[in-house]
Image (cartoon, helix red, strand yellow):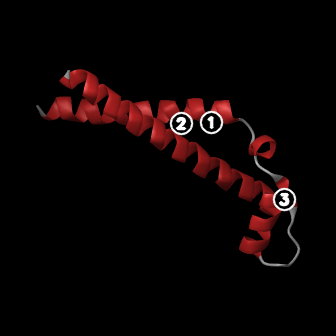
């Protein structure tokens, strides 16, 4: 009984990471799909009105990418799990 629960949880974690890899590959580079002006405004908000270097922008694009990928992955994962439960209960 405990082994089956452990296997189910492990498979859900593996499934979540597989979805996140697929979503991350499909989104591509955040420089392509995220607006430069919005990135500049966010960088000025986070780093102050001083000089904003390229490293700060690379960090910002990385964080935006991670937040976007995991948010989209979470939505897909929740919808998939609800669909699987609905199919099993029918």
Crowd around label 2: few <14 · some 14–19 · many ≥20 (10 Å): many
Above or below residue 89? Residue 29 is below
Residue 84 image position (x, y, % from top left): 31, 26
Instruction: Name the residue nearer the viewer: 38 or 22.
Output: 38
Tell me the residue at 59%/33% (across/down).
23
Judged from the image, the secondary structure of the residue bearing numbered disc 1 is: helix
Image quadrant where one finds the N terminus: top left
Tag 1–tag 2 contact (CB < 8 Å): yes
Which residue position is annotated with label 2? Answer: 20
Give residue 87's mark: none
Q: Few, some or many C-alpha atoms within 10 Å of disc 3 (few <14, some 14-19, many ≥20)?
A: few
Image location of residue 45, percent across then percent down? 74, 73
Q: Which mark is residue 24?
A: 1
The local secondary structure at tag 2 comes to helix
Task: Tell me, yes or no, if residue 19 can be seen here.
Answer: yes
In the rendered view, does 2 fall on the left or right side of 34?
left
In three-dimensional space, the C-alpha distance between marks 2 and 3, rounded to whole angstroms, equals 27 Å
Label 3, on which residue?
A: 37
Picture coordinates of residue 62, whole percent (x, y): 69, 51
Q: Quadrant of the C terminus?
A: top left
Q: Count the numbered circles shown.
A: 3
Farthest residue toward the bottom?
A: 49
* Relative to 2, residue 47 above or below: below
Pointer 2 or 3: first along the chain: 2
Q: 10 Å neighbourhood of mark 1: few (<14), some, or many (≥20)?
A: some
Which residue is more in the foreground, 84 or 52?
84
Which quadrant of the structure image shows residue 83? top left
Q: CA distance from mark 1 to mark 3?
A: 23 Å
Tell me the CA gap for discs 1 and 2. Answer: 6 Å
Q: Earlier in the sequence, mark 1 or mark 3?
A: 1
């Amino acid at each position: 009984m405990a082994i089956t629960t452990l296997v189910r949880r492990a498979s859900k974690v593996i499934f979540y990471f597989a979805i996140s890899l697929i979503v991350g590959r499909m989104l591509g580079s955040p420089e392509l799909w995220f607006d430069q002006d919005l990135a500049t405004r966010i960088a000025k908000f986070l780093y102050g009105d001083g000089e904003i270097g390229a490293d700060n922008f690379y960090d910002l694009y990385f964080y935006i990418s991670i937040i976007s990928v995991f948010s989209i992955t979470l939505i897909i994962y929740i919808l998939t799990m609800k669909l699987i439960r609905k199919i099993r209960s029918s």
